[in-house]
Image (spheres, rainbow, N blue to C red):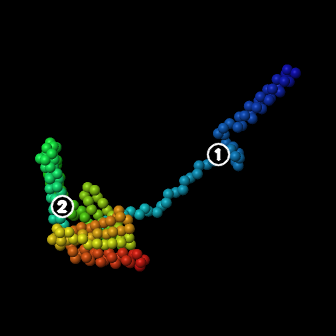
Amino acid sequence: MTDGGADRMTDGAADGVTDGAAEVPGSAAPAGSLGAPISPVTPPAAPTAKSRRLDYDGPWRRVSSKYVGVVVAESIVTGAVLAAISLFFALVIGAWFGWWMLGAAVIVTIVLLVVAPRRARAIGFQLRTDDLLYRQGIMFFRIVAVPYGRMQLIDVNRGPLARALGLSDLKFVTAAASTGVSIPGLPEAEADELRDRLVALAESRRSGL
């Protein structure tokens, strides 16, 4: 009985080890079974369409060279205001830092006068097929595209100095207030002609022609 029992126990132990070894995690399972490994899903390919980029490599129309005088006058006025504030702190209040402010105001005024011609030349615009492209700025460069169909108001403004120089500012008001654009330094005849042309383009785009 001892030998038979031992034989039966040995056979049972061997069978148990064999059955357990068949279910080791990570082993390959028969095809179609629930335990079969799942092949990784390949992500969909990215769209191949080219992204639309704002193309502003075309010719730019510049403002009048007389607009440099307007920029110079604005720089002088800015410097005068800063100097007056500095002198108020230095002479009236007696603050020691007022003289430092006066020196800084002089430096700022000189820098503005030096870059005034470059600031005027940095302003330009393009009349494209569907929109008007406007740019300005030297250090802080800004480009705005104004669709013709979204123009709601096109106004011509002439300040005292600009009127003395024969210049006008052309202002556009669109549905979005953040895209309001004003083109300064245009000759009066060019500003009037451009206003009429933009009005016609805006009406044709809104009517779907």
- Identify the residue at horizontal 29%, vertical 58% (top origin): 141
- Identify the residue at horizontal 49%, vertical 60% (top origin): 47
- Numbered disc in front, either 1 or 2: 2
* Horizontal side of residue 9 vs 86, given as left or right: right
- Distance between the Cα atoms at labels 1 and 2? 75 Å
- Residue 62 visible? The answer is no
The disc, 1 or 2, on the residue closer to the chain's N-terminal end is 1
Q: Nearer the viewer, residue 99 or 59?
A: 99
The spot of residue 188 in percent (x, y) is 21, 74
The spot of residue 133 in percent (x, y) is 32, 67
Q: Quadrant of the N terminus?
A: top right
Of the residues shown, which amino acid type is indicated by label 1? Pro
Q: Nearer the viewer, residue 105 or 126?
A: 105
Of the residues shown, which amino acid type is indicated by label 2? Glu
Q: Is residue 125 above or below residue 31?
A: below
Residue 37 — which label?
A: 1
- Identify the residue at horizontal 21%, vertical 73% (top origin): 187
* Horizontal side of residue 46 vs 209, given as left or right: right
Helix, strand, or loop for circle 2?
helix
**Direction top: furthest residue:** 2
Q: Quadrant of the C terminus?
A: bottom left
Label 2, on which residue? 74
